[in-house]
Image (cartoon, coloured by chain):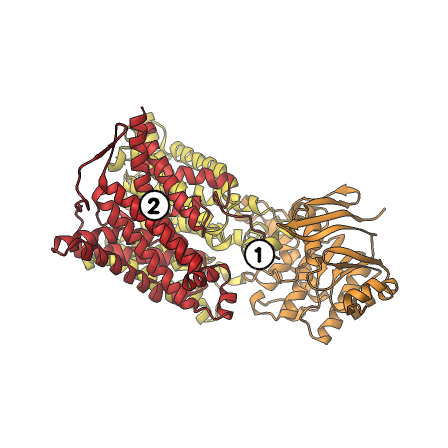
């Protein structure tokens, strides 16, 4: 059975049909990419599946359970993590605290115990800080362990988002343009990072414009155009699909 | 029964018109700068107090009233130039404190100059009440309603039919885009504060012959104007007018039929209920955050 | 959060221990007690406004409920003051929890409006129910008895309040550097990001709102017993604004900023008494100027200048 099944999913904003009747499914353990021109509805699709938007119609199933319309924090309890195309970093916190927040659901969140500084909580927090530092090394941010988030570069913040998502210990992770705005060297690093994440057993769903990276990493690819599914298949199939070529390069009749 | 109802309705619409003018002031500034100007009430107070002062000086009524609108407008512009422009993009709570600071300065200066007494202004055209179906309507109420209606029409014309008005609207929808097409958004901010203060002052002048005025009437009038602006959905001009009238009428009805002691609480109970069920007011649209 | 955050706590405790021995007279003793009471309220309010990023313009209303519970229940019903204080806190907590769910679906100015309205309604109720509350004139509050002896002298009050303040600073420092506190700060930094990692944002906003309201209520009771008198001014809009101003002038999201803000704004009216008639003007001008030149508040501004953590 597929891990994630999306069936006839649509959302309308007023008259704009941002996503229309999109159907696909993702098997556990693969890297699945969503590509398409700007405005094709890729990020909207992510927002729908991760609960930020509520679908107008259609079905989303995770391990067979309907999750359409559930809030993001409910999805988090089911092991769904994501990063954002437009950075969503908490600039009022230290870099490492951003990562620690990712572990929210695995911690004792009691207000009273926290205010009274229960030793068990403090101990767990110290361990967590170690874990978070380890994750920051994993994504290549070892230099920034002691830094405030607002003192970091754009490229570093992109990876900080990934570290925060990984701190959730997710089963399924959505990466929204992790390489956008990065220089070629950073892009290659992110490419390696995504591969490492996939190898650790996490199912990866990727939105990315860098075609080399997409073709390199993806087991399967979904192509969206004007909110509709244009094609779906392996990299090889997508590369040779006439509709995809037309959408990207334009047709000459 | 009907006479009593009409009586409450008349007084409700009259005071509601003042709230509507204040609410329009909130709306103008909110649209231009995203600031809630907690000094709005002080312009209402200032209009009334200055009108009293200038008429007592012996100036002819029209001149006195012009001055009583012009001076608050200048004060409004000063607030914008000195206190709002330097902190562009500050946090909401910072801006709230700045405008409250401004309101304290205005109120403080008013007490230094005019003292803490209560003042009255003669009605513009006599005190002979008009009888309608057993209820009485003061001629001053007609002034309040007539002038408010005129102002609403003039504002509608300004925002829909003149280039300046359209420029102000454009800025409220998208400041950056407005700047890119060459709209001077600094000028828009300037105009919003001037117009908003003038509207508040006008309301204060019109209502003073009915309610009297003193240095401390601004807070409640201002807060109720804010309620009216939120009832209609912040930023919505028509909503502000409807909100003002609604708040005024419900307040008068509540005071008449339920409890006059709780008159001042009624607008706030109303707004809590509206916000509980319609988080963006009666006419506020739905918004979706882009992430 | 720097490791030396607790260093400031030791300094605060040291100052609190030394103060009663160096204060020249009871006037200053009284002033310091009122500063400390305000500081506890502001610490709670800063958790809400500074750390969680949620505004409240009605907190004086909660303070008023606590103060009047301590005045009305012992006077009219013969309740023990501590029981009355607890009842005030319970009522405040229940009321805050009841309204918080719908209120915290609101954002920005709508939230400001709703909290402002709530505070004003409470204030008007206190003003109108004269048969219980003495109306606009207020009413006397019986003395507080603690474990057999009466709390009456300034000295006794001082040590009670100093203890409350020290514990509050310690608890606040603990809280912000905990899973709960990180979730609060995260929902301020990015609401959607905190939701996506599993933070139920409305629950957290409600929790901190209720907690800060209960803080205010308890300290309202303490103020009532200390001053021996309550009036509706305790709960009016202007007092709510004063409390918010203490938070912002001291520094949002700064524990020690809360203390500085409370100290400065409690002392300011005393200092302004020399301006006969111009107090309001000068007070308003100070609010504006400090926000224009230090929008982040005193402690964070100074900390940034001298390169130190909060």
Looking at the rendered image, the quarter that the C terminus of chain B falls into is: bottom right
Residue B167 locus on image (x, y percent): 45, 63
Q: Is residue B167 left or right of residue C235?
A: right
Residue mark closest to the camera, 2 vs 1:
2
Look at the picture and state if B102 lies above or below B251: below
CA distance for labels 2 and 1: 36 Å
Chain in yellow on the image? C
Residue lying at the far top in this picture: please name it. B1
Q: Chain of mark 1?
A: C
Look at the picture and state if C85 lies above or below B112: above
Chain in orange on the image? A
Q: How many marks?
A: 2
Chain in red on the image? B
Q: What residue is shown with label 1? A: C190
The reply to whether dot 2 and dot 1 touch (C-beta < 8 Å) is: no
Residue B172 locus on image (x, y percent): 47, 59
Q: Nearer the viewer, residue B262 or C190?
A: B262
Disc 2 on helix, strand or loop?
A: helix
């Amino acid at each position: 059975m597929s891990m994630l099944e999306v069936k006839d999913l649509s959302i309308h904003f007023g008259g704009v049909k941002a996503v229309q009747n999109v159907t696909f499914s993702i098997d556990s353990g693969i890297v699945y990419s969503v590509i398409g021109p700007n405005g094709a509805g890729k990020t909207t699709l992510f927002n729908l599946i991760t609960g930020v938007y509520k679908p107008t119609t259609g079905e989303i199933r995770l391990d067979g359970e309907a999750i359409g319309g559930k809030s993001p924090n409910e999805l988090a309890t089911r092991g769904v993590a994501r990063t954002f195309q437009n950075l969503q970093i908490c600039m009022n916190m230290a870099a490492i605290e951003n990562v620690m927040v990712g572990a929210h659901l695995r911690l004792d969140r009691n207000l009273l115990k926290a205010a009274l500084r229960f030793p068990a909580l403090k101990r767990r927090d110290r361990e967590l800080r170690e874990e978070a530092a380890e994750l920051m090394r994993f994504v290549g941010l070892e230099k920034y362990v002691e830094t405030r988030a607002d003192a970091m570069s754009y490229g570093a913040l992109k990876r900080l988002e990934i570290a925060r998502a990984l701190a959730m210990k997710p089963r399924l992770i959505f990466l929204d343009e992790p390489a956008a705005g990065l220089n070629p060297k950073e892009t290659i690093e992110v490419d390696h990072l995504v591969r490492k994440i996939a190898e650790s057993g996490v199912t990866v769903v990727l939105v990315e414009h860098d075609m080399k990276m997409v073709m390199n990493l993806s087991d399967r690819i979904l192509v969206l155009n004007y909110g509709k599914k244009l094609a779906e298949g392996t990299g090889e199939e997508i590369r040779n699909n006439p509709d995809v070529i037309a959408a990207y390069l334009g047709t000459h009749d | 029964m009907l006479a009593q109802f009409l009586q409450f309705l008349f007084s409700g619409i009259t005071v509601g018109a003042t709230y509507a003018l204040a609410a329009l002031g909130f709306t103008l500034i909110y649209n231009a700068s995203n600031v809630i100007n907690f000094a709005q009430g002080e312009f209402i107070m200032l209009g009334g107090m200055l009108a009293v002062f200038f008429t007592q000086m012996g100036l002819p009524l029209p001149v006195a009233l012009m001055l009583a609108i012009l001076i608050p407008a200048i004060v409004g512009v000063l607030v914008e130039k000195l206190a709002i422009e330097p902190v562009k993009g500050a946090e909401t709570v910072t801006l709230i404190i700045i405008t409250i600071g401004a309101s304290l300065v205005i109120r403080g200066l008013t007490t230094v100059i005019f003292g803490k007494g209560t003042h009255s202004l003669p009605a513009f055209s006599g005190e002979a009440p008009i009888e309608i179906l057993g209820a009485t309507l003061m001629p001053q109420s007609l002034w309040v309603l007539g002038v408010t209606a005129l102002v609403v029409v003039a504002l509608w014309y300004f925002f829909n039919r003149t280039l300046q008005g359209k420029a102000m609207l454009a800025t409220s929808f998208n400041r950056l885009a407005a700047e890119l097409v060459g709209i001077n958004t600094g000028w828009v901010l300037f105009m919003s504060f001037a117009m908003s203060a003038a509207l508040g002052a006008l309301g204060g002048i019109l209502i003073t012959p009915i309610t009297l005025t003193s240095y401390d009437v601004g807070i409640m009038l201002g807060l109720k104007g804010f309620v009216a602006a939120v009832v209609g959905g912040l930023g919505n001009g028509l909503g502000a007018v409807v909100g003002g009238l609604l708040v005024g009428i419900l307040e008068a009805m509540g005071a008449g039929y339920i409890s006059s002691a709780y008159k001042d609480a009624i607008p706030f109970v109303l707004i809590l209920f509206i916000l509980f069920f319609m988080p963006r007011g009666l006419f506020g649209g739905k918004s979706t955050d882009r992430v | 959060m720097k490791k030396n955050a607790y260093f400031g706590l030791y300094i605060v405790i040291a100052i609190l221990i030394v103060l009663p021995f160096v204060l020249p007279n009871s006037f200053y003793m009284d002033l310091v007690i009122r500063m400390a009471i305000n500081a506890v309220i502001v610490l709670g309010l800063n958790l809400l406004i500074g750390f969680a990023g949620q505004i409240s313009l009605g907190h004086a209303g909660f303070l008023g409920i606590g103060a009047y519970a301590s005045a009305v229940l012992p006077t009219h019903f013969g309740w023990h003051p501590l029981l009355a204080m607890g009842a005030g806190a319970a009522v405040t907590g229940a009321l805050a929890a009841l309204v918080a769910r719908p209120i915290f679906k609101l954002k920005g100015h709508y939230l400001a409006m709703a909290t402002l309205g709530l505070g004003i309604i409470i204030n008007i109720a206190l003003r109108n129910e004269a048969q219980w509350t003495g109306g606009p004139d207020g009413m006397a509050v019986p003395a507080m008895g603690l474990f057999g002896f009466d709390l009456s002298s300034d000295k006794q009050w001082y040590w009670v309040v100093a203890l409350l303040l020290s514990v509050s600073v310690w608890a606040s420092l603990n809280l912000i550097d905990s899973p709960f506190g990180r979730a609060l700060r995260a929902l301020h930094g990015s609401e959607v990001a905190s939701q996506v990692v599993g933070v139920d944002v409305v629950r957290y906003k409600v929790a901190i709102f209720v907690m800060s309201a209960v803080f205010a209520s308890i300290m309202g009771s303490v103020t009532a017993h200390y001053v021996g008198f309550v009036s509706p001014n305790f709960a009016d809009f202007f007092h709510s604004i004063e409390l918010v101003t203490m938070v912002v002038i001291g520094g949002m999201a700064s524990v020690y900023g809360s203390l500085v803000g409370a100290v400065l704004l409690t002392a300011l009216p005393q200092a302004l008494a020399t301006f006969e008639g111009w107090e309001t003007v000068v007070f308003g001008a100070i609010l504006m100027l400090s926000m224009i030149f230090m929008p982040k508040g005193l402690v964070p501004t100074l900390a940034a200048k001298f390169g130190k953590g909060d």
